[in-house]
Image: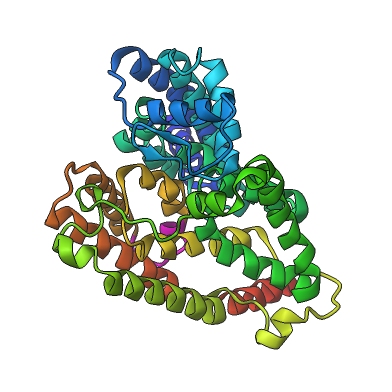
């Protein structure tokens, strides 16, 4: 009797950590742990000033009546983020006594972190691709992520919050509202555009070319409406500064290309080659791994059908892997950029056939690479090796078209 009881308890515990239906139970326990940890960190670990004061100086210029982007700047240089950033951080400016109350700012970012986790957990719960125990590697374990949120107060986490909100809306098939919040994320920081190729393919898959146009117009309208005060004063200046795609990155901050010489790192031909590789990877993955339609013509001209071929896993896989390819071929990754893909790595790894022990090792090595300051030749090379393994695992997966046919076959068997 006792042995049988112990066996049942052990099986229940095993199921709790390995059955995806228990993600919310484990997730809520981790949220509580994160609340305690965040409060402890804010109260005991020294805040480090990097960009917060510059953010406050930039939005203070707008508050004082300067709407010319060419005139807006802070201690770290000119304002280089779109208009959504300005509005959000004006709110933070007033909530933190003109940016002076750092503790309040830290608690605001702790709230952003917790909400972000809730949105990510919902994505993982919907897809049911990742066992609950994997969430332990996402929470409480990353020094760098907690640093980005509550010890550095970067704008990247705010942009990612809107990105994960938009993905949740896409999962519920609220595509128009999702596009609205996706564009809000872009208006805070342009790294969200790395998800855009995946989103475009999903829209074309769901709606076809003509019916996709209104969704894209929603994204464009958000950018224009938010920018109106600045466009009225100096439209060219706003576009040049807020969407400055040609901006050079400093070699001293690079996480991913430390093993190169600074001269090669700054070479325009090298940067152009990375862009070509990125676009090539997007096209190849788009055609042969993400596309659930039979061909490009069918993708652009969606046929009339009784059921959608879009499901939760397809949405998340396409969006997450689109962003990952952008990270992989980025001309420079800085430490705060880790948040751009940290919460997606666990999903991307667990949908591959990579052995579990190697998946955990890869997560550890990526964390080590992002925590090595300053970065070294070895840490940069390790990061690229990990990225290469993940991308290979994603490529070797069954294409989404075959996944769709397999799912349909399974449904017919069940019927």
Q: Which quadrant holds the C terminus?
A: bottom right
Which secondary structure is most common in the magenta stretch?
loop
Q: Please provide percent x and percent y for residue 78.
A: 41, 41
Q: Please provide percent x and percent y for residue 124.
A: 55, 48
The answer to whether residue 260 is seen in the rendering is no
Q: Residue at x 41, y 35 (%)?
A: 139
Describe residue 258's horizontal placement relative to residue 36 as left or right: left
Describe residue 231's horizontal placement relative to residue 44 as left or right: right
Q: Residue at x 48, y 59 (%)?
A: 323
Q: Residue at x 51, y 51 (%)?
A: 190
* Colour scheme employed for the rendering of this structure: rainbow
| Camera-nearest residue between 336 and 398 | 336
Report the number of discs: 0
Rendered position, 413 above or below 236: below
Q: Please provide percent x and percent y for residue 169.
A: 70, 48
Q: Residue at x 41, y 16 (%)?
A: 102
Q: Is residue 351 part of the magenta span, yes or no?
A: yes
Displayed quadrant of residue 141: top left
Q: Is residue 95 part of the magenta span, yes or no?
A: no
| Camera-nearest residue between 345 and 17 | 345
Q: Please provide percent x and percent y for residue 356.
A: 34, 57
The answer to whether residue 259 is seen in the rendering is yes
| Camera-nearest residue between 177 and 352 | 177
Displayed quadrant of residue 389: bottom left
Describe residue 90's horizontal placement relative to residue 211 as left or right: left
| Camera-nearest residue between 389 and 201 | 201
> Which region shows up in magenta?
348-355
């Amino acid at each position: 009797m006792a042995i049988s009881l112990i066996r049942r308890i052990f099986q229940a515990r095993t199921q709790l950590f390995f059955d995806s239906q228990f993600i919310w139970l484990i997730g809520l326990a981790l949220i509580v742990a994160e609340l305690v940890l965040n409060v402890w960190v804010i109260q005991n670990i020294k805040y480090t000033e990097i960009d917060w004061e510059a953010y406050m100086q930039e939005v203070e210029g707008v508050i004082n009546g300067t709407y010319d982007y060419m005139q807006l700047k802070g201690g770290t240089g000119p304002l280089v983020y779109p208009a959504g950033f300005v509005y959000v951080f004006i709110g933070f400016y007033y909530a933190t006594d003109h940016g002076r109350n750092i503790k309040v700012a830290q608690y605001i970012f702790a709230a952003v972190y917790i909400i972000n986790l809730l949105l990510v957990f919902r994505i993982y719960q919907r897809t049911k691709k990742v066992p609950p125990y994997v969430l332990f590697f996402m929470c409480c374990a990353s020094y760098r992520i907690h640093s980005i949120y509550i010890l550095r107060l970067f704008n990247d986490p705010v942009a990612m919050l809107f990105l994960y909100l938009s993905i949740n809306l896409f999962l519920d098939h609220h595509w128009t509202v999702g596009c609205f919040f996706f564009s809000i994320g872009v208006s805070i920081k342009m790294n969200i555009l790395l998800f855009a190729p995946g989103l475009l393919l999903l829209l074309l898959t769901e709606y076809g070319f003509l019916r996709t146009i209104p969704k894209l117009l929603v994204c464009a309208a958000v950018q224009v409406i938010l920018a109106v005060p600045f466009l009225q004063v100096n439209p060219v200046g706003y576009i040049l500064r807020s969407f400055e795609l040609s901006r050079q990155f400093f070699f001293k901050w690079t996480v991913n290309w430390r093993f190169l010489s600074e001269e090669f790192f700054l070479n325009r031909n090298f940067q152009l080659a990375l862009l070509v590789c990125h676009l090539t990877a997007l096209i190849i993955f788009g055609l042969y791994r993400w596309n659930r339609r039979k061909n490009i013509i069918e993708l652009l001209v969606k046929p009339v059908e009784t059921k959608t071929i879009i499901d939760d896993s397809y949405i998340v896989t396409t969006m997450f892997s689109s962003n990952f390819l952008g990270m992989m071929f980025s001309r420079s990754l800085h430490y705060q950029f880790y948040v751009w893909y940290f919460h997606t790595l666990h999903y991307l790894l667990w949908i591959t056939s990579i052995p579990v022990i190697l998946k955990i090792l890869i997560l550890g090595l990526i964390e080590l690479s992002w925590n090595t300051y300053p970065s070294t030749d070895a840490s940069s090379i390790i990061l690229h090796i990990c990225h290469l393994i993940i991308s290979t695992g994603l490529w070797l997966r069954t294409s989404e078209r075959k996944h769709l046919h397999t799912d349909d076959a399974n449904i017919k068997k069940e019927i």
